[in-house]
Image (cartoon, rainbow, N blue to C red):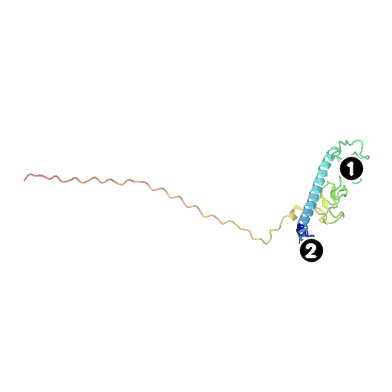
Amino acid sequence: MNFPARRPPQRAGFTLVEMLIVLGILVLLFAMVVPRFLGSQKKAKIDTTKSQIGMFRAALEYYYLDCDQFPATEQGLEALVAKPADLPDNVTWRGPYVEGAITRDPWGNPYQYENPPTHGTGDTPDIWSFGPDGEDGTDDDICSWTGGSASGGAETAPDEAKPSTAGTRTKTPKARSEARPAASPKAFSPKPSRAPAPKPIRSDAP
């Protein structure tokens, strides 16, 4: 008589405990990796914005050398790409001063431009980005006059940037004692050699 072969028992699937353990591991990995990725991505966007603002400032310097003036606020940064229609005939525009069109910041907002400047010092126009939050006048604005936050207003004076030294103790180097005179080398005098005493001569005579 042939008996049917027994089939090995098959598992129905993962148990609830196993699924919870796997889910907990995935949540832990997600919590560790995602904040680091978002932080590095935000820093990369800020660095890109600063580089673009620096490129605009360099292009404006070339514009000033040719036109003897910076573009007005109404002309904006587009004056670096196309000749402004209201530019006087006696001014020679030798652009474009940047390649391609004026791009937006990494958050999709247009760069802000103002001339005459109202924030920075000097005659260089103000260029800034609204930053990650997309709002003007907040702490995360990226500006040409400070290189960072717009809340500070004008650039910090050089004297204010230096830390105060009041109330701090400074170490004064101790005076070095006078060097002792070098001892003169002793003169070498050879010791006198002692001649051997003559031996007495014995005589056999009576």
Residue 156: in sight, yes or no? no
Q: Nearer the viewer, residue 98 or 26?
A: 26
Q: Residue furthest bottom?
A: 17
Disc marking residue 16: 2
- Earlier in the chain: of badge 2 and badge 1, it is 2
- In the picture, which quadrant includes the N terminus? bottom right
* Residue type beneath disc 1: Glu
Q: Quadrant of residue 175?
A: bottom right
Instruction: Report the front residue among 157 and 82.
Output: 82
Marks 2 and 1: which is nearer the front?
A: 2
Rendering coords of residue 51 (x, y %): 80, 46
Q: Is residue 192 above or below residue 136?
A: above
**Residue 81 in the figure: left or right of residue 172:** right
Mark 2–mark 1 Cα distance, whole angstroms, equals: 62 Å
Q: Which residue is mark 1?
A: 78
What secondary structure is marked by label 2?
helix
